[in-house]
Image: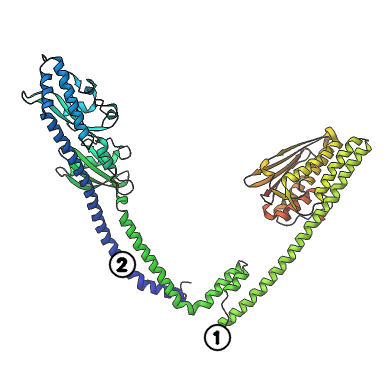
Amino acid sequence: MFYSLRSRLMMVFSILLIVPFTTVIFILSRESSELIRSSIETSTSQTIDQFASHVVTLLTQVEDIGTQVMSNRITQEWAALQLNPESPVEERVLAKQKLREYFSSYAINNSNGITLSAFTDSTGGLWTQDKDYILTEWYSQYRQYERRWTNAHKDKDQADQILTGRDVNSFLLPLVHLQSLREIGFVKINYPTDVLRDAIEKIGFGKTGKVYLLTQDGTSVLGQDLADNRDVLRNGLSQLEQRFEGKTSGIFPIEQNDVAYLLFFRRLPVQDWIIVGEVPEKELYQQISDTTRMLLLLSVLLLVAVIVVAFLLSFGITKPLSAMARAMKHVERGEFGRARQKMPEARAGHSEIGYVTRTFENMTERLRYLIETEFETNLRRKNAEYKALLLQINPHFYYNTLEIIGGLAAAKREELVMDATEALGKMMRYSLNLDSDIVMVKEELDYIRDYLFILQLRYEDHLHVAIEEDPAAGEWMIAKFILQPLIENAVKYSLEKEGKACISLETRVVQDRLSLAVTDNGIGMPPELVDSLLAEVGSGESIRILDSSGHSIGLRNVLARCRLFYGEQFTLQLESELGQGTAITLQLPLVRS
């Protein structure tokens, strides 16, 4: 095929067009990747700088509020009274009430939800007079390390219960009496954590990249969940201290668990905080990957275009042979109609090709005629075999049934003759209905129950039958009269052995297969007969019921009908031991009406 004219043309066009275009694509892809990478990094850094500017603006406002509150006359009067233990209680209460009103009005008039509180070592918080704040983490950091900017927390010392339930960050300012310069506690300016957390969580890079506001030790200032990225951030902060000392912002790559990440950072020196953005490198540069894929797609489209052009150029040369090759493939699969459609038009000008085309067309038509004739002949033969098997069942069965009714009459059991006759009538109506060769499993079981009723009248305690019916199997279709001969044989050969027959009939649906099993305690079968029956079923040939010379006619009849009806989808399990009994399982495909 490679040395055909069409293949050579396609190869030449591919070399002339694809190689130069691929080179251009490679150069463009590399240059565009660098430009996009630079643009993405600049845009990401600008986004982080914008958030940093927002943080600085808010925190500057918080500091200004702290300075204003500290220098306010109401605050200083309250501080002076706290320093004077001999001041009247009434004046202290009045001063505290004025300070509360001042703090409340300030919070109400502030658009960012900032609230104020004051704490002294002697009286505790301004709003709760509670000293539990001494046990908090933020107070410990303030006293031990003089950290005035706290991480996110909840503050019980608020003007109302609603405020105590929200997360806040705070700025702590020593409460100093300006005239005496004595420190009596500190002022706490709270701003809602959500003011910054909502803004930072809106920033995203790629699909999973996030931005965090962290302290130098890697703790989240805003209470963000670091669980999934804690190791990446910890590794990044460690490298940041080593590689970027003195720099306020930058970008650097790190690797964690064989995944490459990019970290963007921006320091806030006043608060000793760091804004850190982390994102898997492949996610951030997804645009580059998309561009590369687009260029590759263009290459593929060009290749397709080249193939189409080469095909069109070679079409007039190779068309008849190619069409004939396609037609031959359909003939090989037996699709003669499609082969006829694919055959090239035979023209006199084609010389040898025209002769080959006409000859092949005539040969195909002749082959199709012979195959269809053979198929119709085989179908008629199979149908005749099937009808012969059905005709063989009825006389054999009704002879045995009438013998049972005759036995009841001979025993002068007239009261049961009516029931037996009614059961026989139902069976005859069922067997004489030739509208269809298939019935539902539950209909076949009803027929078997009528038959067993008659047998039970005859053999009484000598016959015991157990029927285990799977409800899921009742609606599936099976070939008619394949259970009755098996039951008849089971009863017959079991009574021959000990005069007592124990028969079981089971229907099940197992792994998309319908299983029909009949078990008896009869005389069993010789091993050579078992092997012969299994070999006949497995060979794929029709069971030779008419040549059985009277041996196992009922069983062979069932196997032959199953083989004719289901073909290779029918399988048989046959277990038998002389003197012990026989178990026959027919496994059939599930068939709907």
> As displayed, is residue 417 above or below residue 481?
above
Q: Residue 429: in sight, yes or no?
A: yes
**What amino acid type should be assigned to the residue bearing mark 1?**
Gly
Residue 23, labelled with which disc?
2
- Disc 1 to disc 2, how far (Cα)? 46 Å
State left or right for residue 163 relative to residue 586.
left
- CA neighbours of label 1 inside 10 A, class few (<14), some (14 to 19), many (20+): few
| Residue type highlighted by circle 2 | Thr
First reached walking from the N terminus: tag 1 or tag 2: 2
Residue 283 image label: none
> In the rendered image of this protein, does residue 106 appear above or below residue 423?
above
Query: What residue occupies the far left of the structure in this picture?
Result: 179
Q: Position of residue 195 (x, y in %)?
A: 25, 38
Whole-percent x, y for residue 149 in the image: 19, 33
Question: Mark 1 and 2 residues: CB-CB less than 8 Å, in contact?
Answer: no
The tag on residue 349 is 1
Where does the image place residue 583, in percent across and percent down from the top left? Answer: 73, 41
User: Is residue 304 shown above or below 229?
Assistant: below
